[in-house]
Image: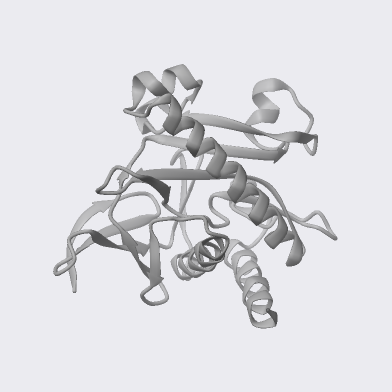
Amino acid sequence: MKGSLLYEGKAKKVYAITDQPERLILSYKNDATAFNGKKKDQFEGKGRLNNLITSKLFDYLHQQQLPSHFIEALNDTEQVVQKTTIIPLEVVVRNVAAGSITRRLGIEEKTRFTPPIIELFYKEDELDDPLINDVHAYHLTDISEKELSFIKEQALLVNEHLIQLFKDVGLELVDFKLEFGRLKDGSIVLADEISPDTCRLWDLETGKKMDKDVFRENIGDLVETYEAILQRLEEYTCAK
């Protein structure tokens, strides 16, 4: 079933499926990177946690009628997805000021954004994934104005549903990054992953950071933090 290695990124390996050319296997690695790969480390068990958390979140979004490339978790570290051509945009949704926006614009951390702010970043490692506007996106990618509007609408819907889900498990969704890809028929769906690597999550009671910032800022145990998030999601699923 599992075919040749097609691509290896910072956090995942992508494999072909020999008898299903329109499907792929994503294998999650234990690598952790921050600041566009400038800070690196490995944490035993991280790949398992991101795979299982992403699987649960995509399953939840499917239940809310929000399509993605996700099909199923194959095992602890791998999942089967539909093959997509990734659009080289990172779509960041911000509910609360944290991270780069505080440094770029001098906005105080914890400032709330109503409505949420959507930012676009061009996926290009050599340029450190620069912030771009809509017109830049039209020039740098093959995306149309209508498609970009659709992507933003989908991102806001994902935000609405994840805010509620994380609230139910005692977490505040501060911000997160999404990627989108084109299926064989040209339709655009949510792709990549949704995990503590790509979201900022703060504990609602304590304000404690429960995401990759514990690695970025050296303020906690990354695996222990991710394990706590998975446990909360599993308890929520069992209670439903």
| 107 relative position to 2: left or right | right
| 160 relative position to 11: left or right | right
| 115 relative position to 13: left or right | right
Residue 218 seen:
no
What colouring method underlies this structural image? one colour
- Residue plotted at (50% across, 31% down): 149
| 122 relative position to 170: left or right | left
Is the residue 223 above or below the residue 141 in the image? below
Residue 233 seen:
yes
Q: Position of residue 176 (x, y in %)?
A: 59, 45
Q: Quadrant of the N terminus?
A: bottom left
Count of labels shown? 0
Q: Quadrant of the C terminus?
A: bottom right
37 and 189: which one is in front? 189
- Residue plotted at (70% across, 81% down): 239
- Residue plotted at (62% across, 77% down): 234
Q: Position of residue 153 (x, y in %)?
A: 56, 39
Q: Position of residue 207 (x, y in %)?
A: 81, 54
84 and 94: which one is in front? 84
Q: Position of residue 202 (x, y in %)?
A: 74, 54
